[in-house]
Image (cartoon, rainbow, N blue to C red):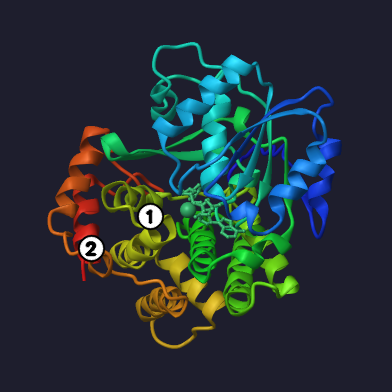
Amino acid sequence: MNNFIYKNPTKIIFGKGQIEQINTELPKDARILMVYGGGSIKRNGVYEQVIRAVGNRKLIEFPNVPANPEYDHLIEAVKIIREEKLNYILAIGGGSVIDGTKFISAAAKYDGEDPWQIVCGTAPIKKAIPFGTVLTIPATGSEMNAGAVISRRALKEKRPFDSPLVYPQFSVLDPQVMITLPTRQIANGIVDATMHVLEQYMTYPVGGHLQDRFAEGIMKTLIEEGPKVMANPANYEAAASLMWSCTLALNGLIAQGVPTDWGVHAIGHEFTAIFGIDHARTLAIVAPRYYEYLLQEKREKLVQYANRVWNISSGNDDERALQGIQKLENFCQSLGINTHLSDYTEEYEGTAEEIEKRFIERKWSGIGERAQVTPEDVKKIVLKTYK
Ligand code: NZQ
Ligand code: ZN
């Protein structure tokens, strides 16, 4: 196992009726910006619960953060924070709202010229406004990690950034909020979390036996409990397991001491930037082709995954690995998620070349756990995702 240092400062408050705990977590003198999305929180009672818990602290609302949070919109929140001298942010929503909040939190304390530099990683984050979250959709793990992904449609860009300064102070996880989730969003969450586990697992063995078992356990739980939530989001037992699995899939725990490969996400983000495809769906398009392409490098873990997650024990190693990849693709499809780019757009020709160009421009000369996947490899992988 590789050396590691691990610290995750986010306090998790999990379970039924826990939103009222916000009152205890918020500083008494908090002057709050409340960030949320398109209004789902007004249909499931979350909004009222938050307002009640905040009590008579000063609160300004910042609604309408879109899926794939938009830079030009978030910048407006930064102005409000400065004008109103706010000192705390509450993010009420999913990955988009929480990621948007992370950007607002850092940008409000940034004194440089161009806050986009924060997203590009060219301006270090030195300070950030503290924030807490109420999670409304299990998927990204943003509620317990220090990463965010911000889109800028004018540039057709979608870029990740991270900083230990943007861990949430606390996150409330009440699985009952999932009752209003559309099936499509539940499916997205299940697949996104599955891919998060795979990105931290599907590399090569380094003796991280516990990390492997954690990862396999999370994947098996997602596979078993996810479809139950799709069938009935009011199934509290299944919803609780799904929500906690999604958080643990990307709170840093399973990545400690082992190599990781965020290549599927790096390519998937380009599909969202170019075509606006839902994040999880881009991963379902990329992952099967990515793992087939890298079968030699990832063979040992692919075989272990096929065996331990899908009980595949017949055939030689390559056949087992391929069966495991097929199971992953079937699982996505069983949740109603298509796995080819042509299922989402007719204008897929030229995508591979465009993504190769972007990777070269950004000097992303090698992704993958050994930086072995060149922009040309990326082009070849994307070509295979078309049909
Ligand atoms: O905007 P509202 O009306 O709230 O509707 C949202 C939105 O349309 C809806 N929704 C959320 N909770 C609901 C609900 N509808 C009914 N009932 C509820 N309880 O769901 C829709 C999608 O929400 P969104 O926040 O976009 O989903 P998700 O959590 O999947 O977040 C996706 C974003 O997170 C990024 C993605 O790239 C994407 O931008 N990611 C963030 C990561 C991180 N910070 O670590 C890692 C991920 O890999 C990912 O890249
Ligand atoms: Zn993801």
What secondary structure is found at the residue carrying circle 1? helix
- Taking depth in this image into account, of 291 and 54 the one nearest to the observer is 54
Residue 130 lies, with reference to residue 310, above or below; the image says above
**Amino acid type at mark 2:** Thr
What secondary structure is found at the residue carrying circle 2? loop
- Which residue has dot 1 on it? 264
Q: Locate residue 142 relative to residue 315 in the image: left or right.
A: right
- Which residue has dot 2 on it? 345
For marks 2 and 1, the one nearer the N-term is 1
Residue 66 lies, with reference to residue 386, above or below; the image says above
Residue 49 picture location, percent across and down:
77, 49
Q: Distance from label 2 to label 1 (Cα)? A: 19 Å
Q: How many marks?
A: 2
Residue 44 picture location, percent across and down:
67, 59
In terms of image quadrants, where is residue 52? Answer: top right
Residue 107 appears in the figure: no
Check disc 2: other Cα within 10 Å, few if <14, some if 14-19, many if 20+.
few
- Taking depth in this image into account, of 32 and 368 the one nearest to the observer is 32
Q: Locate residue 81 relative to residue 279 in the image: left or right.
A: right
Which residue is depicted at the point 31% across and 68% down?
292
Q: Quadrant of the C terminus?
A: bottom left
